Amino acid sequence: MPVEQFVLIVFGMLVALFAAQILSLCLNHKHVELQCEVDTDLTEPDELFTLSFRARNTGLWPLFYVSVSFALEEGLEVRESEAWKQANCTKNASLTMVRFKLSLLPRHTARGRVHLSASRRGQYVLGKGYIETGDFCGFSSKVYSYDMPRKLVCTARRLPEEPAIKPAGGFLGEMAARRFILEDPSLILGYRSYTGAEPMKRISWTQTARTGQLMVRNPDFTVDADVVVLMDEEDCGKELTERCLSMLRTACDMLEAARIPYAVISNGDLSELPKGVGRRHNFEIQRRIGLSHFTRYRRFEDLAAQCAAGELIPRGWIVIVPQADASVRASVARLGAAANGQVCLLTGEEATNHA
């Protein structure tokens, strides 16, 4: 082979290598498509969930080095074997990095997953991570960050001890066993003269026009059962706060198990949840529990007085407070008078039945 031809071939190879190196530095990261997902939106402390991903090489040349990393914020724990953690995890004071090293052939997809759990109640942002791609020759690499808008909410831990909620259990057992009667405005037996004690919305204007005097609807009665869980969000320290939220979660779980419709009313950022029962209803209250900062917007005494004076009084109340002082007990007594004594008081320090 002539020397000139050999030199030309070598020169062409060097040019091709240099071009591949430059292109890999500029374009490798653009040929990696990443999709991440979590198998749940709502979890509880120490419950396992899975963070999985799919990485695809959309280019026409292989990617010999791709690293996919996730930065897990404080409170999220990796639930894998110790050998797996040593090979794939690095931890500092506030973050845990989980790294997957891949090689992707052209048009090839790789998958990976890691099992996690949350150690405390709150909201976690899942998706802050990094993609690292190496150049064609393996001399250097570039790191690019990405964000996934997925968020995970961890609700409060269910109370493990039965004695703490035993009064509530007896109260709910009585609620489930006894059927009781409430007015049903959708069922009309007839009409009668307005006495002044009925609310204005019960007036039938059609019958009033026919008879020439104010007439009100006479509702039928139906068998129904409902409970209102009343929550005082006064911040008395983290321990009492978390215990009250655990009590709320446990009480709602018990009502769900008994299929008793319930509403949740609070004087803080838990807000109000109308009466209902079922998976979606329970999901919403568990999500609110996880997001709550236990911030109070009004006095509990004012809220309890408004509830006691309301037109639609439920069959029973479950009142959850961090501490029960004299004013709280007086408010509970007023609720009990309005609900014929069916009030269950649960505190962060003790649970006593006022039925």
Image (cartoon, rainbow, N blue to C red):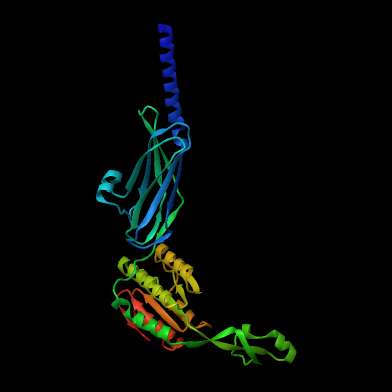
> Quick one: 146 or 235, which is closer to the camera?
146
Q: Can you see residue 269? A: no
- Identify the residue at image location x=31%, y=50%: 94
Quadrant including the N terminus: top left
Q: Position of residue 299 (x, y in %)?
A: 43, 74
Q: Position of residue 229 (x, y in %)?
A: 43, 76
> Quick one: 332 or 117, which is closer to the camera?
117
Q: Can you see residue 59? A: yes
Q: Position of residue 212 (x, y in %)?
A: 73, 91
Q: Please, which residue is most extreme toward the front here?
A: 1
Quadrant in which residue 152 is drawn = bottom left
- Identify the residue at image location x=44%, y=25%: 20
Q: Position of residue 297 (x, y in %)?
A: 45, 69
Q: Is residue 102 above or below residue 126?
A: above
> Quick one: 39 or 3, which is closer to the camera?
3
Q: Is residue 61 above or below residue 207?
A: above
Q: Is residue 240 above or below residue 69?
A: below
Quadrant including the C terminus: bottom left
